[in-house]
Amino acid sequence: MKRNENTLTRLEFEVMNILWDLDRPACAWDVLGRWTEPKPAYTTVATYLKVLYEKGYLDFSKNKGEGKTHMYEPLVSRAEYTRRTMQDVKKNFFGGSLKSMFCYFIREEKLTSEEIRELLSSVEEDEQQ
């Protein structure tokens, strides 16, 4: 089965999370410095950055006088990626039905009646704004 090019692997997502958290252009060493143990090799991080650039998630620039150092920054925000991913989940697993998706999570998470009331209250507040 061919993988969706818009979907991030677990490790690509880790790289993106680090870049989103940094909120500034960063090089491979910056990403590696933020990686939790066990850290991958520098070349592995550099490869992930290149793949993310090729997929259209990142752009890069070179700082003058910095040699070959590429400074990467996200082209897609965390919120935008989350929105796209949740849209795909809704479409692919729940036939596009938000109601079915919510019901699934309510059942799977075994939400209490109080938690469901809190969710409904939150939705009602959003509707009033």
Image (cartoon, rainbow, N blue to C red):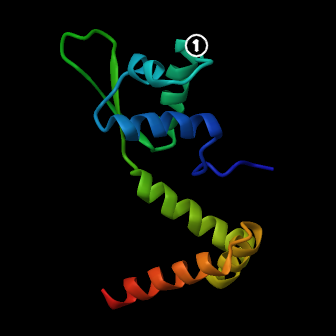
Q: Position of residue 111 (x, y in %)?
A: 68, 72
What residue occupies the far left of the structure in this picture? 64
Q: Which residue appears at 45% of the width and 80% of the height?
A: 122
In this rendering, the count of numbered labels is 1
Horizontally, residue 108 falls left or right of residue 72, namely right
125 or 74: which is nearer to us?
125
* Residue in the image at 71% along x and 69% along y: 92
Say which residue appears at 34% left-offset and 34% top-offset. 22
Say which element carries label 1.
loop
Q: Judge from the rendering whether residue 37 lies leftward or rightward of residue 58; answer left or right.
A: right
Q: Nearer the viewer, residue 103 or 26?
A: 103
Quarter of the rendering containing residue 67:
top left
Quarter of image, res 44 = top right
Front in this rendered view, residue 3 or 79: 79
Q: Amino acid at mark 1?
A: Ala
Q: Is residue 83 above or below residue 123?
A: above
Residue extending furthest toward the right: 1
Classify residue 12 by image quadrant: top right
Q: Percent from the top left, x then y, of residue 15? A: 50, 33
At 34% from the left edge and 90% from the top edge, which residue is drawn?
128
The answer to whether residue 90 is left or right of residue 128 is right
Could you say where residue 24 lies in the image, as x and y percent from the top left? 28, 34
Residue beneath disc 1: 41
- In this rendering, is residue 3 above or below 50? below
98 w.r.t. 40: above or below: below
Quadrant of the rendering where the C terminus is positioned = bottom left
